[in-house]
Image (cartoon, grey):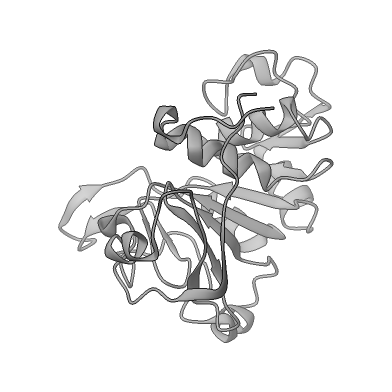
Amino acid sequence: MGSTDMTTCTASELMTVHAARLLRDGDVVFVGVGLPNLACNLARRTHAPNLVMIYEAGVIGARPSRLPLSIGDPTLVTRATSVCSMYDIFTLYLQRGNVDVGFLGGAQIDRFGNINATVIGDYAHPKVRLPGSGGSMEIAGWANRCYIITPHQKRRFPEKVDFATSAGFLNGRAARDASGVRGGGPQVVVTNLGFMEPDETGELILTALHPGVTVEDVQANTGWALKAAANLRVTEPPTDE
């Protein structure tokens, strides 16, 4: 099976494919909106047919016949394993540790994987007011693994977020451990330039580059002195499939 020409692959398609590849067959995944939704449905239709998709509106084991337009799309209910209340989703599944993966996006992600989806600028007098947390705060705190997907731009990757909507490693792994949240925190950040993963301190470092991207390209689009892993790898491009 041939690889897709990287010049014909959009940034969104590239991120979606690589995010989908992170999911394992049989994973229980709390699906976020936007690109996480695309990635999860792509994974289920390709290499992970037994993926258990949970949607915040109260759907467990969704098997949509078409791409859902939102977390409340009626296509999610048809053939689903269970339909329950939002309260049950968060208390009986997420907070009990029954969700393997939380898939999130964000307007800003900082060097410790904290996510801002609330405001750009000062909270009292913001430049931009964003949609807010929804369920992302709980997902980031309680999912066993958290994956983040967002375009790689310097304004999106400040050293410190303007507002911490959802916890990554706060200001380091020790701080997250002391906070009492049970989830594993962010494991991979997927962008259109490559992958970032936390080191032993919880700081995000560059671990993979997409073909044709250099370390300098990524560092120039990051708001802190981004370190590169010693075993930096190059990702496999999307296939024609």
Write the residue at 78% across / 49% down.
92
User: Along the horizontal axis of the image, is 37 left or right of 184?
Assistant: left
Residue lying furthest front: 2
Q: How many discs mark residues in the rendered view?
A: 0
Write the residue at 57% across / 51% down.
235
User: Residue 212: x and y, percent?
Assistant: 42, 49
User: Residue 180: x and y, percent?
Assistant: 65, 77
Q: Is residue 120 above or below residue 201?
A: above
User: Along the horizontal axis of the image, is 120 left or right of 25?
Assistant: left
Q: Is residue 45 above or below residue 102?
A: above
Give whichever of 184, 212 is nearer the camera: 212
Q: Is residue 165 visible?
A: yes
Give whichever of 209, 73 is nearer the camera: 209
Q: Is residue 87 visible?
A: no
Write the residue at 42% across / 51% down.
193
Q: Is residue 66 above or below residue 22?
A: above
Quadrant position of the C terminus in the picture: top right
User: Residue 230: x and y, percent?
Assistant: 55, 77
User: Residue 39: x and y, percent?
Assistant: 60, 35
Write the residue at 63% across / 81% down.
177
User: Along the horizontal axis of the image, is 149 left or right of 68?
Assistant: left
Quadrant position of the N terminus in the picture: top right
Q: Is residue 197 above or below residue 67?
A: below
